[in-house]
C-alpha cells in the first residue's frame, strides 16, 4: 500500500519548530565555519562581530537613520507603483483592447535589467531621492501590472455572468464584482511585490546615495568590512520578512470570507 | 409526441395551463443557430432550434452532454450571441443579458464577500429599491428556501445545496420574467439533489415562475417539468417536444409510480435511439 506523503498536513507546532530549527541550523553552520578558523574573518565574519557592528551602529544612530531612509524609499516607490499599477492592471485584466496595448509592452520592459537603468535615471531625474524612488518604481511597476491583470482575469466567468443576469452593467460589474472578488489575490500580489521592492533597494542606492541600508552595504564592500555587509543583508532580510508577515496578517483579517480561508 | 398525448391516465389534476395559456408565450426562440468558428474550421453547436415557453410554464431541455443545451440557455440569457435566428422575450429581441432573465448556474456563483442577505439584495441595490422593501423581499425568499437563520452568514459557511438555494432565491427575488437554470443540482450529492428537486417543485407550485431548466438527468426533468424538449447532439437539434402530463401537486413518491417510470423511459428512448 502507498503511504500518502505528498502535501500531507503537519501540525502548526511542528511547522514552527521546523522553521525555527532551519534558522538555528544556519546559525550553527555559520558559527562552526567562522569559528574553526578555516575561513578568514575577512571572507566570513563571526556572528559576534556582526552583533558588535549592530550594537555600534545602534549606539551612533546610523542604523536607525539608514533603515528609516531605506524604508521611506521603498514605501514611496512601491506606493507609486501600486497607485498607477492597480488601475491599469485591472483594465488589462478586464478589457482585451487594454490587454493588447499594455501586456506585450510590459512583458518586454520587465525583462530589462533594472540596475542597467540606473545611469539613465541619473540623467533623467537627477541624483536626489526621486532617483532612488524611480528605481524601485521601475523594478516593481511592470511586474505589478501583469500580476494585477492576472488577478482580475482569475475572477470566475460565472461570477461575472451572474452579475449580468442580475442587471449589473459594465461599470457595476467592475466595481461591485471584479474588484471585491479579486481583493484576496490582489493582497497576495502586493505582498509579493513589496518583497521585490526590497530586493531592488541595493540597486536604488547605487544612485549617488550617502545613506540607506543598500548604500551601507556598497560602502562596506569598498573597505572589505564584511561584518557590516552581513549586518546590512540580514537586516534587509529581516525587514522584508516583517513586511511580508504584516501583509499576510492583513489578508487573513480582511478577507476571512475567502473560500478555503487561507 | 402524439403518442404521449393520446394516452389517458387516471390522475385527476393535470397541468392544464399548458393548453390554457397558449397565447401567453414569454420566451420565443426561432431558427436559432450557433456556429463556433476557429482556424481549424467551424463547428455547429446548435441548429434550427425552435422553442416556445409559456407564462408560468416549467420547461426542461434535456440531451446528451455536448448537445449544446447549455449554449442554448446561455444564448437566451444573452451571455452568448447567436450566429443566426431570433430570441424574443415578450416583445423584446434579445441581444444581451439583463435582469429580466435570472439565471442559476451549475457552479456556485454567490458573491463570497457578501452575506446571504446581501447576495439576495444585489439586484435591488443596483436599482436603488427602498430599504424596507429590500428587507421585506429578502425575508420572504429566505423563508421560501428555508434559510431564515442564515441571513447574515457568508457563503463559505454554507453547504453546496444551501448555496444553490440562495442562488435560486437571489435570481427569483429580482422577479425576472423567466428563470434560467443550467444544471443547478448536478454538483450535489444524490440525497441533496432530490431535496432540491422537491423544493424547486414546491417553489414553482407556489410562486409560478416561468422556468427553463437544463439538465442531463431525465428523472429530474420529468419530475420538475410540464414540458420537455429533447436535443440531439452535434449539432444540437430539437428532436422532440414532450408534454409531461403528471399530477400538479408532486412529491418524491411520484417517481415510483408507473406513469412516471413510463414517461422517463420514453424520454430516455428519444435520447438513446434518436427515434422511437
Image (tube, coloured by chain):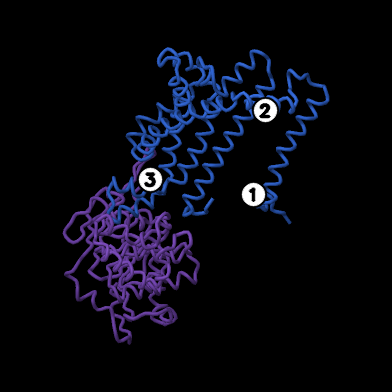
Chain colours: A blue, B purple
> In terms of secondary structure, where does tag 3 sit?
helix
Task: Please tell me whether mark 2 or mark 1 is closer to you in this view.
Answer: 2
What residue is shown at x 38% (from left), y 52% (from top)?
Answer: A159
* Viewer-nearest residue: A238 or B242: A238
* Callout count: 3
Disc 1 sits on a residue from what chain?
A: A
Dot placed on the residue nearer the N-terminal end, 2 or 1: 1
Q: Which mark is residue B45?
A: none
Q: Secondary structure at mark 2?
A: helix
Which residue carries the number 1 mark? A7
Instruction: State the separation of the CA atoms marked 2 and 1.
Output: 43 Å
Q: Camera-side residue: B151 or B231? A: B151
Mark 3 and mark 2: span between their CA atoms? 46 Å
Mark 3, mark 1: which one is toward the viewer? 3
* Circle 3 residues within 10 Å: few <14, some 14–19, many ≥20: some
* Visible residue check, residue B231: no
Q: Residues within 10 Å of mark 1 (few under 14, many from 20)?
A: few
**Closer to the N terminus: mark 3 or mark 1?**
1
- Say which mark, if any, is on residue A55: 2
Q: Position of residue A39 (x, y in %)?
A: 79, 21
Q: For residue A92, which quarter of the picture?
A: top left
Disc 3 target residue: A179
The chain letter for the residue carrying disc 3 is A
Which quadrant does the N terminus of chain B fall into? bottom left
Q: Is residue B54 left or right of residue A235?
A: left
Choose mark 3 or mark 2, whichever is in front. Answer: 2
Where is residue A251? Give x, y as percent. 50, 46
Question: Could you say which is closer to the camera, residue A196 or residue A202?
Answer: A202
The quarter of the picture where residue B2 lies is: bottom left
* Image coordinates for residue B178, horizontal then vertical, percent: 27, 63
Q: Chain of mark 2?
A: A
Residue A57 on image: x %, y %: 63, 24
Amino acid at each position: 500500500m502507498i503511504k500518502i506523503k505528498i502535501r500531507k498536513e503537519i501540525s502548526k507546532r511542528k511547522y514552527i519548530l521546523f522553521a525555527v530549527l532551519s534558522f538555528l541550523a544556519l546559525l550553527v553552520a555559520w558559527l562552526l565555519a567562522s569559528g574553526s578558523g578555516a575561513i578568514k574573518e575577512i571572507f566570513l565574519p563571526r556572528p559576534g562581530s556582526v552583533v558588535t557592528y549592530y550594537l555600534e551602529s545602534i549606539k551612533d544612530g546610523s542604523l536607525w537613520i539608514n533603515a528609516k531612509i531605506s524604508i521611506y524609499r521603498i514605501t514611496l516607490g512601491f506606493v507609486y507603483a501600486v497607485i498607477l499599477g492597480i488601475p491599469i492592471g485591472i483594465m488589462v485584466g478586464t478589457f482585451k483592447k487594454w490587454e493588447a496595448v499594455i501586456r506585450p509592452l510590459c512583458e518586454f520592459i520587465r525583462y530589462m535589467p533594472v540596475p542597467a537603468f540606473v545611469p539613465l535615471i541619473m540623467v533623467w531625474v537627477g541624483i536626489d531621492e526621486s532617483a532612488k524612488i524611480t528605481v524601485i518604481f521601475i523594478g516593481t511597476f511592470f511586474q505589478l501590472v501583469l500580476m494585477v491583470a492576472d488577478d482580475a482575469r482569475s475572477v470566475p466567468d460565472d461570477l461575472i455572468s451572474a452579475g449580468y443576469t442580475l442587471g449589473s452593467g459594465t461599470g457595476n460589474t467592475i466595481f461591485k464584482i471584479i474588484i471585491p472578488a479579486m481583493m484576496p489575490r490582489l493582497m497576495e500580489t502586493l505582498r509579493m511585490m513589496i518583497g521585490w521592492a526590497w530586493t531592488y533597494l541595493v540597486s536604488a542606492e547605487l544612485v549617488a546615495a550617502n545613506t540607506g541600508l543598500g548604500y551601507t552595504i556598497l560602502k562596506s564592500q569598498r573597505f572589505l568590512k564584511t561584518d557590516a555587509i552581513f549586518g546590512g543583508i540580514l537586516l534587509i532580510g529581516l525587514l522584508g520578512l516583517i513586511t511580508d508577515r504584516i501583509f499576510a496578517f492583513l489578508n487573513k483579517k480582511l478577507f476571512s470570507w475567502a473560500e478555503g480561508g487561507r | 409526441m402524439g403518442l404521449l398525448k393520446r394516452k389517458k391516465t387516471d390522475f385527476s389534476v393535470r397541468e392544464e395551463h399548458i393548453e390554457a395559456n397558449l397565447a401567453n408565450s414569454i420566451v420565443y426562440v426561432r431558427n436559432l443557430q450557433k456556429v463556433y468558428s476557429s482556424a481549424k474550421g467551424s463547428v455547429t453547436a446548435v441548429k434550427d432550434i425552435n422553442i416556445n415557453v409559456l407564462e408560468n410554464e416549467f420547461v426542461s431541455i434535456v440531451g446528451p452532454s455536448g448537445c449544446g443545451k447549455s449554449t442554448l440557455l446561455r444564448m437566451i440569457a444573452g451571455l452568448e450571441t447567436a450566429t443566426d435566428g431570433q430570441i424574443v422575450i415578450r416583445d423584446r429581441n434579445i441581444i444581451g443579458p439583463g435582469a429580466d432573465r435570472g439565471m442559476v448556474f451549475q457552479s456556485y456563483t454567490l458573491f463570497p464577500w457578501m452575506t446571504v442577505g446581501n447576495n439576495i439584495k444585489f439586484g435591488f441595490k443596483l436599482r436603488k429599491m427602498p430599504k424596507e422593501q429590500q428587507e421585506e423581499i429578502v425575508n420572504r425568499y429566505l423563508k421560501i428556501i428555508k434559510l431564515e437563520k442564515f441571513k447574515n452568514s457568508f457563503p463559505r459557511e454554507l453547504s453546496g445545496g444551501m448555496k444553490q438555494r440562495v442562488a435560486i432565491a437571489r435570481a427569483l427575488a429580482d422577479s425576472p420574467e423567466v428563470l434560467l437554470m443550467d444544471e443547478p443540482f448536478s454538483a450535489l450529492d444524490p440525497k441533496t439533489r432530490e431535496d432540491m428537486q422537491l423544493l424547486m417543485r414546491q417553489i414553482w407550485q407556489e410562486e409560478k415562475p416561468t422556468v427553463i431548466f437544463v439538465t442531463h438527468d431525465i428523472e429530474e426533468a420529468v419530475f420538475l417539468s410540464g414540458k420537455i424538449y429533447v436535443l440531439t447532439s452535434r449539432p444540437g437539434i430539437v428532436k422532440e417536444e414532450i408534454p409531461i402530463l403528471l399530477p400538479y401537486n408532486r412529491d418524491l413518491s411520484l417517481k415510483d409510480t408507473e406513469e412516471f417510470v413510463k414517461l422517463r423511459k420514453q424520454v430516455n428512448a428519444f435520447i438513446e435511439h434518436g427515434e422511437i
